[in-house]
């Protein structure tokens, strides 16, 4: 039988509240998770908005003075690290402390990371980046899983609920580049990082105060470690660290800098862990035959997500460089801050998310299916890469009108709304019961793997025009979109018992 991910007759929480529509037609617990995610994303995107500029700026201006190509690759691999470490968060929730505690501890670690970045020293800067990555890994997969816990498995509000939740992400992401960019322009990078710390502090406080609005499922540990397994954890962690260091050292055989060696090691880890997760779930005796069918359907969706994030996450990398180096610096006598552009996709999501949520709810069980939405998302991101290829080839110096980059961000947002909130919902529906939070970590690993591939392409194409970089990305994305479209009938058969609106689900939905 399919996994239940929320309160209901089959849910792990054992509580059914079908009449709970206190938050815009959704369970009241969504309001708590909404505001926690909003402030957490404020801190994350605020830090990310200035990270590349901090890395490549001169020491005299408070930066670290890295080469632009290496800086872009570091930002990309940092993003990969954030989502790679979601494995830690998923494992901690499923096997050690539950989703709620993992989320709480992750928030505290993130706040410590931003405070470290606020200290004007190179050592604390790298420490802060590492802490933010670790803390986000603990928090990110579990708060999304808790959204899934709010709904009955076949509740038609699921996709629209995740879309509402996605609005929280983008409200925080919209405000933070404006605030942090303003602070950076007037008081320097470390003032901007301080604002990110305040945002994360607000998220932690809100989460603690809102605990009563959530059901019991986030406190459960669905797959407890046995005593024997607990004794092995420390040894496994030590072995992983040793292997990582060895890979970093070996990368010195073909890389010239430590930065590139670490980039290669994280890239290898992201791909290896992703494959390992799929193998583990398919081989686990705790996974039923129906759940394996769902996992098979999930593989092409996961690959499509990898390609999508490979291009999309360059908002803080290649596209940030286009904002600072190719886009006009003034419009009508008003200075254009390059960080502002990173607020555009968030604003577009806030405007468009209710429309997409309404469409997905009304079209439940009909075209577009989950797989079709994924294919559309990948195709759209491929088109955006084509536009960026043209823009880099056309504009030199600070000559591009602001609508060029702004328009690309809007195009990418349309693709994002076809794929990302739908992907979150699909993951909670297709995941095996014993791997609930870890399956959400697998979803975020698609971003880690995608950004790892992007980092490799960036370093491999060093010295080549950025127009060629984006052309290569566009060809890959459009080819993958065609393949997913062709696989839609097969995917739907494999996930038939989990897709919303299937005929055999109607009685449950009506209840």
Image (cartoon, rainbow, N blue to C red):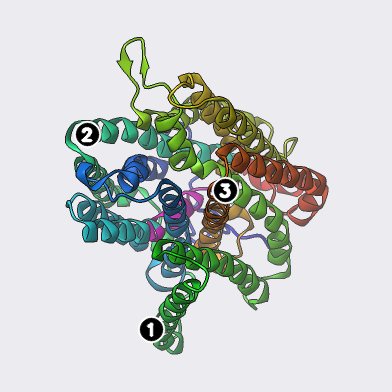
Q: Which of 253/494 is in front?
A: 253
In the image, what residue occupies the spot 69% across and 32% down?
363
- Callout 1 crowding tier (Cα within 10 Å): few <14, some 14–19, many ≥20: few
Say which element carries label 3: helix
Task: Give the answer, above or below, for where 503 lies relative to 239.
Answer: above
- The quarter in which the C terminus is drawn is top right
Residue 473: percent from the left, percent from the top?
Answer: 64, 44
Main SS of the magenta part reads: helix
Q: Residue 428 vs residue 24: left or right?
A: right
What's the distance in space between the residues labelled 3 and 1, CA to CA? 33 Å
- The nearer-to-camera label among 2 and 1 is 2
Residue 97 part of the magenta-drawn span: no
Magenta stretch in the rendered image: 137-152
- The nearer-to-camera label among 3 and 1 is 3
The answer, for residue 174, to whether it is visible in the render is: yes
| Marking on residue 99 | none
- Callout 2 crowding tier (Cα within 10 Å): few <14, some 14–19, many ≥20: some
| Marking on residue 234 | 1
Quadrant for residue 173, please give it: top left
- The quarter in which the N terminus is drawn is bottom right
Q: Which of 45/206 is in front?
A: 45
Residue 84: percent from the left, percent from the top?
Answer: 47, 61
Task: Give the answer, above or below, for where 455 lies relative to 276.
Answer: above
Q: Give the labeled residue for mark 3.
A: 310
| Marking on residue 183 | 2
């Amino acid at each position: 039988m399919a996994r239940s991910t929320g309160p209901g007759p089959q849910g792990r929480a054992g509580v059914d509240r079908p009449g709970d529509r206190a938050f815009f037609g959704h369970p009241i617990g969504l309001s708590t998770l909404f505001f926690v995610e909003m402030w957490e994303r404020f801190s994350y995107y605020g830090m990310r908005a200035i990270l590349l500029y901090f890395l490549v700026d001169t020491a005299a201006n408070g930066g670290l003075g890295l080469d632009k190509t290496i800086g872009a690759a570091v930002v990309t691999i940092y993003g990969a690290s954030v989502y790679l470490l979601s494995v830690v968060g998923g494992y901690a929730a499923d096997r050690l402390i539950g989703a709620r505690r993992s989320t709480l501890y992750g928030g505290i670690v993130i706040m410590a990371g931003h405070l470290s970045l606020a200290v004007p020293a190179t050592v604390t800067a790298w420490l802060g980046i590492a802490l933010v990555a670790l803390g986000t890994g603990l928090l990110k997969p579990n708060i999304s899983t808790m959204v899934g816990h709010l709904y009955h498995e076949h509740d038609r509000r699921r996709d629209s609920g995740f879309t509402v939740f996605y609005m929280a992400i983008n409200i925080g992401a919209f405000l933070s580049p404006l605030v942090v960019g303003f602070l950076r322009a007037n008081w320097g990078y470390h003032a901007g990082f301080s604002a990110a710390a305040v945002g994360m502090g607000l998220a932690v406080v809100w989460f603690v105060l809102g605990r009563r609005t959530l059901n019991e499922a986030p406190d459960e540990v669905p797959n407890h470690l046995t005593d024997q397994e607990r004794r092995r954890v420390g040894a496994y962690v030590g072995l992983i660290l040793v292997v990582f260091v060895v890979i970093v050292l070996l990368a010195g055989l073909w890389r010239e800098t430590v930065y590139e060696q670490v980039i290669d090691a994280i890239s290898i880890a992201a791909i290896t862990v992703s494959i390992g997760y799929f193998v583990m779930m398919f081989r686990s005796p705790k996974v039923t035959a129906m759940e394996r069918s769902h996992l098979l359907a999930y593989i092409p969706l996961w690959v499509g997500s990898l390609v999508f994030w490979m291009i999309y996450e360059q908002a803080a990398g290649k596209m940030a460089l286009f904002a600072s180096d190719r886009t006009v610096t003034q419009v009508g006598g008003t200075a254009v801050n390059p960080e502002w552009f990173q607020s555009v996709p968030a604003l577009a999501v806030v405007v468009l998310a209710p429309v997409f949520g309404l469409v997905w709810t009304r079209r439940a069980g009909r075209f577009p299916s989950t797989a079709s939405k994924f294919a559309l998302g990948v195709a759209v991101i491929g088109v955006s890469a084509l536009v960026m290829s043209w823009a880099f080839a056309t504009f030199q110096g600070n000559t591009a009108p602001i609508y060029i980059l702004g328009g690309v961000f809007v195009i990418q947002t349309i693709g994002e709304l076809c794929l990302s909130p739908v992907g979150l919902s699909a993951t909670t529906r297709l995941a095996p019961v014993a791997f609930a939070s870890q399956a959400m970590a697998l979803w975020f690993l698609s971003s880690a793997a995608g950004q790892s591939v992007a980092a490799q392409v960036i370093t491999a194409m060093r010295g080549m025009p950025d127009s060629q970089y984006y052309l290569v990305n566009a060809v890959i994305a459009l080819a993958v979109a065609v393949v997913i479209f062709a696989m839609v009938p097969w995917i739907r058969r494999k996930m038939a018992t989990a897709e919303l609106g299937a005929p055999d689900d109607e009685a449950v939905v009506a209840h």
